[in-house]
Amino acid sequence: MAKQILNKHGLDYVGEFIVGWRDMHHVIDVLYDRTNPEETKRADACFNELLDEFEKRGYAVYRVNTRFMDRVAQSYGPVKRRLEHTLKKALDPNNILAPGKSGIDLDKFNDW
């Protein structure tokens, strides 16, 4: 599935599997020329499509580039986000430690 989506956007599949005792991770590197605006646009569209398709099929994405952290956080639903913001507010009320990391940013979601 990932290879088909990447190829559709003119990008190559570069992936690896990391296998642990009770888990397996499929790491996909979306490689593109950042100095080329058209290629950057295609890479963004590709990655958004990958996230959409993984979410539809129930695959959890948990580690992404900071550019997509908020998008991935949304895929886990409002209950998890509310819990994360509640903990962040209690432990880091000034939003000093990694604001926005993993979609948790008190400046954006201060009503939680």
Image (cartoon, rainbow, N blue to C red):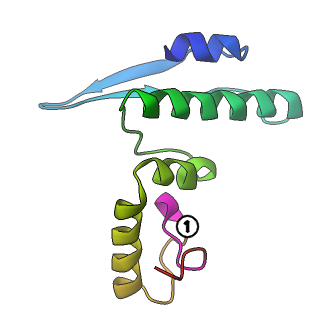
- Please give the name of the residue rendered at 65% of the width and 11% of the height, measured from the top-left corner: 7
**In x, y percent, where is residue 90?**
35, 86
Tell me: residue 32, above or below residue 67: above
Q: Is residue 24 left or right of residue 26?
A: left
Observer able to see residue 29: no
At mark 1, the secondary structure is: loop
- Give the extent of the magenta segment: 101-107
Instruction: Give the class, few, some or many, for how many residues have Cα within 10 Å of label 1's Cα (few <14, many ≥20).
Output: some
Along the line of sight, the residue nearer the viewer: 81 or 61: 81
Image-quadrant location for residue 85: bottom left
- Residue at 63% x, 50% y is 67
Looking at the image, residue 80 lies above or below residue 40: below
Q: Which amino acid lies under the numbered mark 1 shown in the image of this protein?
A: Gly
Where is residue 59? Give x, y as percent.
36, 32
Q: Identify the residue shown where x is 50% and y is 47%.
A: 72
Name the spot of residue 83 as percent of width and height, x first: 33, 70
* Residue at the disc numbered 1: 100
Q: Residue 12, relative to residue 85: is it above or below?
A: above
